[in-house]
Amino acid sequence: MTPTRLSSAPDSTAGSLCPDLPYGEVCAIHQPNLFPRLTTLAKLFTADYWIVLDDVQFARRDYQHRARLASLDGSGQPQWLSIAAHLPHGRSTTIRGARLADPARCRRRVVQLLADHYRHSPHWPPFKRRLEPVLAAFARTDRLADVTELSTRLLLEEVGWRGRILHSSDLLARGERSQRLADLAWLTGAATYLCGTGGMRYLAPAAFRVHSIEVLPFQTPGSGIWAAAREVSAVHALMLVGSCALRRELEGLRGRVLESDPRPGC
């Protein structure tokens, strides 16, 4: 996608018209995560398109290179599945700049831990076959973000998401935090921005109001397959109920979230 400059971005709500919506009305912006949590997958599923936030600082203590896996029967403590990352520029390394430290070893660990946790699920054999493109990426690239984004794409495909994927590194957005997210949403024609519970703690809605973009809080249920949704990879829910049942859960949640959007259609 050709980068778009912000020289024409409106400075006030009065100067902001409803833009064309080339990708859809509802936007989610999130870092590429390794086999993301169910909360993250649900937010992306609810959006018409996902902007992969790949040009911000890599955080070792986040989910950008690791995921929690839980046993099918709920016994024991969740276990971290981590991919070793090399940061060429130290702490200032961006997500897209992070590299795989030992691709072959990382691949073996992904296969081993996923199988250890989920091979007894009836949904494991087909998922294992569809996992191959993710595993093959370890031999094709040393970019961590390529692998983690592929793992998210896999889960989105499993639940039948038909949205679009863009990358923040292809867009020229200004500022930090709220301003940057608002500009990314505006650049791509969003009418609604989905914001998770973590983001709502720091987000400044005024930055979005300048562009007439509605900030829609995104929350998931707290029971059933959602009980550990904020901590455990969505692979766990997929192995428990299968892709069809999980898609129905996500579709139901999407409907409830978007029904709460107070913004009238453009």
Image (spheres, rainbow, N blue to C red):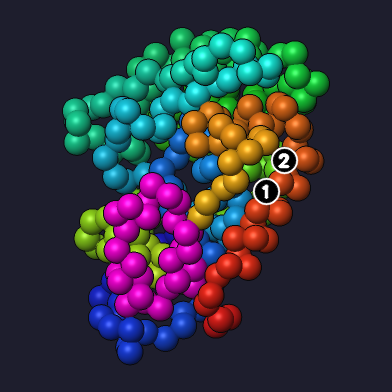
Judge by depth and name the residue closer to the eye, 227 or 186.
227
Q: Quadrant of the N terminus?
A: bottom left
- Position above or below: 57 against 190: above
Cβ–Cβ under 8 Å for marks 2 and 1 = yes
Question: What label does residue 250 carry, if any?
Answer: 1
Query: Considering the numbered disc 2 on the image, is that residue within a helix, a strand or a loop?
Result: helix
- Please name the residue shown 58% across and 41% down the image: 222
- Amino acid beneath label 1: Leu
Query: Considering the numbered disc 1 on the image, is that residue within a helix, a strand or a loop?
Result: helix
Magenta region: 191-217
Question: What label does residue 246 carry, if any?
Answer: 2
- Please name the residue shown 32% across and 88% down the image: 15
x, y percentage for residue 37? Answer: 53, 35
Judge by depth and name the residue closer to the eye, 198 or 177.
198
Direction bottom: furthest residue: 14
x, y percentage for residue 190? Answer: 48, 69
Direction front: furthest residue: 223
- The residue carrying pointer 2 sits among few (fewer than 14), some (14 to 19) or many (20 or more) residues within 10 Å by Cα, namely many
x, y percentage for residue 113? Answer: 57, 13
Please state if 249 lies on the left or on the right of 78 as rendered.
right
- Position above or below: 75 against 227: above
- Amino acid beneath label 2: Leu
x, y percentage for residue 146? Answer: 46, 35
Q: Is residue 127 visible?
A: no
